[in-house]
Image (cartoon, rainbow, N blue to C red):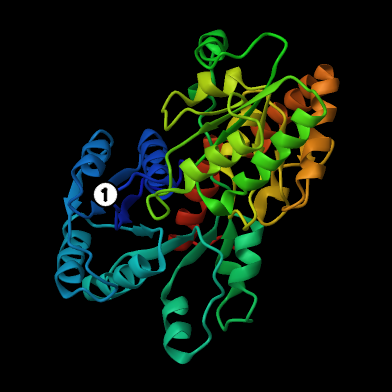
Amino acid sequence: MDNKLPPLAIIELISAREAWGGIEQHALDLARGLKERGHRVIFATRPVDFVIERYCQVGEVFQFPIAGAADPKTIHGLAALIKKKNIDIIHTHTSRDAWTAVFAALAAGRGKVVTTRHVPLAAKTDPVHTWFYNRLAAIICVSQYVRAILLSRSPRFDLNKVKVIYPGIRLERLAGGAAAKYRQLWGVGDDEFLIGYVGRITVEKGLDDLVATAAELRRRQIAFKVVLVGDNNVNTPTYLADLLEEAKRQGGGGDIIHQGFTADIANVMSAFDCLVLPSITPETFGLVLCEALACGKPVIATPTGAQAEIVRDDVNGFLVPPGQPEKLAAALERLIADRELGHRLGATGREIVREQFTIEKTLDQTERCFLDCLVPQKP
């Protein structure tokens, strides 16, 4: 933080869901880091017990119904909180929460609203939305991909307020060393190549392509296993069972394993030989790719969204087109045939993460963005 400027008072406004997700974790990581840098951070969120419990470990938590963008009870209560706590920045993570924050800041007569865009949606250009965007002090996009989509309709607001700040990871959380434990748990032999996937088990992640890729590797008589780490999408309750049944039908009953969700991500990653993210729909960032690279693992992803901002083809992994399992199989076969190649790609990836995707860099840029909203830098 610039020592010439006073510490900031910040509200992280989160209309938390019933499941802990990337937005909730991102807000928590930011709040913890900003607080460590001397800023005062409090949370405003819905009454979701496990979310409140986690946020309470970092700062004060105030509960609001957040029943909609113009919920009067939330706006009135948030405005009172802004005035009482002398808030400088209200930071939001959804468009709906940003509307709420704008109304509350107007009612309070103070506070700059900064919103982070986690989704690829174009800015609307009607007069009401133009008014809204011009009330925001800054718009943070989590990738260049999200920024390009946001501005794709040529909205009428100052483009200088739109920043790209990548979510960052805490490297100290990824110091895993229990690879042998997990490989033994999954029945993976020393000579078997372990392909990992971490994320929600859902159709858009391209896991059908991964099952088809496994069948292709099997036909080539390559020793491997695939581990799917994550919970099934509750909106498609039979998808995981269908996926595993299809793997069995193709003769792969024993080489595709479902682990389920785990918080022990560092040790799980350390057991992989590579991580695959075969998404058929765009990723707005791809934090799991950074986590794998930070663990020194090569990654394979599709270039459907922001993945290509993390994965550099033949540098720290491979980019393969979605819906083409034979090309994914070819990339994996290269890594399986040349283990040293995987080590080199992973080592390069680790350095790229250290340079570009750490929580420290995210905090530096977010802090600067907040400060500029209050004391703009001279050109």
Q: Residue at x 70, y 16 (%)?
A: 192
Across and down, in percent, residue 272 comes to 63, 22
In the image, residue 151 above or below residue 286: below
Q: Residue at x 77, y 41 (%)?
A: 328
Direction bottom: furthest residue: 127
321 in relation to 318, above or below: below
Q: Specify whether residue 165 is in view.
A: no
Task: Give the labeled residue for mark 1.
Answer: 43
- Asked if residue 5 lies left or right of residue 209, the reply is left
Query: Which corner quadrant of the image does residue 213 belong to?
Result: top right
Quadrant housing residue 243: top right
Q: Position of residue 366 (x, y in %)?
A: 50, 49
Query: What percent of the width, then of the height, locates residue 182?
Result: 52, 15
Q: Foreground: 97 or 198?
A: 198
Residue 36 on image: x %, y %: 38, 33
Residue at point 46%, 45% (across, down) = 4
Q: Badge 1: how crowded within 10 Å, few (<14), some, or many (20+)?
A: many
Figure label count: 1
Choose top left, top right, bottom left or bottom right for residue 107.
Answer: bottom left
Q: Is residue 147 left or right of residue 17?
A: right
Which amino acid, mark 1? Phe
Position of the C terminus, as image quadrant, is bottom right
| Residue at image coords 18%, 67% | 74
